[in-house]
Image: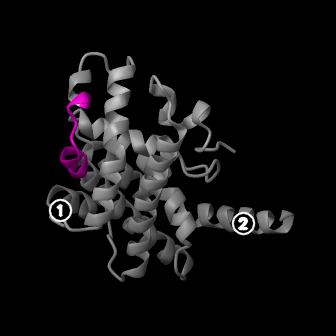
Amino acid sequence: MPDEREPRKASLATRVPAPDPGRDRRLLDAVGGLFDQVIDRILLSADRVTSAAEGKRLLAHDDDTELLTDTVQRVAVVATPVVRAVARGSRFLPRVPWVLVATTTTSLVVTLRTGVSEVRVLGSLLALRLEQATGRPADPALVKQLTLELYLSPKRTPTLTGGLPLGRLVRRWLFRGAIGRDTRKAAGKALDAAERLDVATLESLWRASTRAGRGHA
């Protein structure tokens, strides 16, 4: 199982000229904590996104700028020096490194809010579909796994293995946003995929793997 804590395999520290595993770990922890809070808030609420079309409308007109404001601000503060270090020390996106070097905490807050909105809408639709398919509350861990896999790879059926790819989430939220790429198109594809997903089968596989894991514990 991949481990996001190993800088050589999955972390942003490999892109920095003088890797700082502690700083890199803090960024992954901060982004992971923000993602957890977004999904946990969804599951504590009775409100649900009922379709991909509704989700796209919400993303196009989302004005919930106060959602998790303090947490978003803290993540942006942690992320700012990492983004700048990557721009200075890597051949990553060589044509526009100045954009990343000039990135400010304020601009990262904007990109993070966009990512939070996308995850919130996608996670809400998946939670509803799981609840409708099973007749019981959705498993928070399953909602998180499905949301992140679809959000990052909407063309692929979720495997429910390998843990949460937080390194990839960092790159989606921070780097694509920092260079001005619009992530709404990809988020829309993830919503379409969520609507087509065989959630009942995936939920059964998840429960079976969870029971097997407890049996080997």
Q: Which mark is residue 62?
A: 1
Residue 22 in picture, x, y percent from top left: 52, 43
- Is 137 positioned to the left or the right of 69 in the image? right
Q: Is residue 68 visible?
A: yes
Instruction: Say if 111 sits above or below 15 in the image.
Output: below
Q: Is residue 197 visible?
A: no
Camera-nearest residue between 18 and 118? 18
Task: Tell me the amino acid under the disc marked 2.
Answer: Thr
Q: Is residue 133 left or right of residue 97?
A: right
Residues drawn in magenta: 100-110
Q: Is residue 97 left or right of residue 63?
A: right
Based on the displayed image, in which of its 4 quarters is residue 93 positioned?
top left
Check contact, mark 1 vs mark 2: CB within 8 A.
Answer: no
Q: Residue at x 51, y 28 (%)?
A: 14
Q: Secondary structure at mark 2?
A: helix
The one of 180 and 122 positioned closer to us in this rendering: 180
- Indicate which disc, 1 or 2, sits on the residue closer to the N terminus: 1
Picture coordinates of residue 75, whole percent (x, y): 35, 53
In this rendered view, identify the residue nearer to me: 6 or 85. Answer: 85
Q: Residue 59: x, y in percent?
A: 22, 57
**CA gap, disc 1 to disc 2?**
35 Å
Residue that extends furthest to the right in the rendered view of this protein: 216
Residue under numbered circle 2: 210
What crowding class fits label 1: few (fewer than 14 Cα within 10 Å), some (14-19), or many (20 or more)?
A: some
Residue drawn 20% across and 31% down? 102
Q: Amino acid at mark 1?
A: Asp
- Secondary structure mostly seen in magenta is helix
Quadrant for residue 62, please give it: bottom left
Mark 2, Cα crowd under 10 Å, few <14 / some 14-19 / many 20+, is few
Residue located at (76% from left, 69% from top):
211
Quarter of the rendering occupied by the N terminus: top right
